[in-house]
Amino acid sequence: MLQDSGFTDVVTGEAVDTFGGAKGEANARAFDVHGYVFMATRPAGHGRR
Amino acid sequence: MADDLPVDPDALRDQVRDKYRAVAVAPGAGYHFHTGRELASRLGYGDGAVGTLPDRAVESFAGVGNPFSLRPLAAGEHVIDVGSGGGFDSFIAAGQVGPGGQVTGVDMTPEMLAKARQTAAALGLGHVEFREGLAEALPVEDGWADVVISNGVINLCADKRAVFAEIRRVLRPGGRLQFADIANGRPVPIEAMRDIDLWTG
């Protein structure tokens, strides 16, 4: 979706066990939910400000 | 409601606002997610920057990752924090960009905005401000930001394409989006996706 939205150079970080030990852990485990960090760039060269 | 959205955006927004109003006012009440310093440590925020912040700056933090982990911010950068909540990530960003930079947090929950503004004033951070607004309609001019950060917010927005289009609008060409969010490794049934209660808890 990031690339469809016009972003490039998408980088994804390692999965983090965000919900481990929290009340929502069971739901998170059921759907293999983890936290991730993403980085993406708006391409240059299409006007500025 | 657009036909391709699983839930009504306004109804979801109301529910999210209710949930995070509670997190602002009663951060230790116990939610389905972790909060505060324990969460920040779990997500890999260094003790240095977090340790200098007062409890009120950290206690309502409810992120899902560390958006600074892939790349720290640079001195002087202009930063927008989408869904800034109680301001935790905005304060971390403020420390990284320094007084020559500028951080604008945007949130839709009045209690979170009030808390963040009071904390910024108490910390004497003149280069941080908080504005009321939606992720789909950021109150920021085109191309203002060098970096947009967000943490555990976009997953709570029904129309993610609208959010990404808006983030792209406020970023300068060559600017970066650095955000943390949740993703599921197993497919969620469509019935569950249409159950608005499951989006926030």
Image: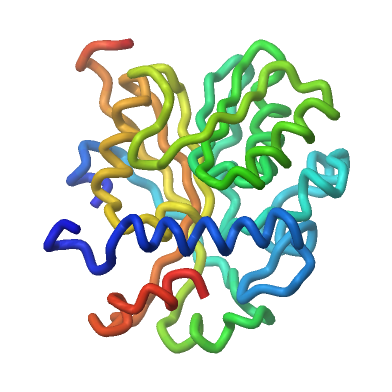
Identity of the residue drawn at 71% across and 14% down: B99
What is the basis of the colouring in this image? rainbow
Q: Is residue B63 above or below residue B126?
A: below
User: How many tags in the picture?
Assistant: 0
Taking the image as shown, residue B19 lies to the left or right of residue B26, namely: left
Identity of the residue drawn at 78% across and 44% down: B57
Identity of the residue drawn at 31% across and 81% down: B188
Classify residue B48 by image quadrant: top right
Q: x, y percentage for residue A10? A: 33, 45
Classify residue B110 by image quadrant: top right
Q: x, y percentage for residue B168? A: 30, 31
Taking the image as shown, residue B113 lies to the left or right of residue B41, namely: left
Identity of the residue drawn at 60% across and 58% down: B20
Q: Is residue B172 above or below residue A31?
A: above
B122 or B189, nearer to the observer: B122
Q: Is residue A44 above or below residue B41?
A: above
> Which residue is most to the left?
B3
Taking the image as shown, residue B134 lies to the left or right of residue B48, namely: left
Q: x, y percentage for residue B142? A: 33, 18
Q: If the image is split into quadrants, where does the N terminus of chain B sit?
A: bottom left
Classify residue B116 by image quadrant: top right
Q: x, y percentage for residue B163? A: 32, 44
B13 or B160, nearer to the observer: B13
Taking the image as shown, residue B184 lies to the left or right of residue B66, namely: left
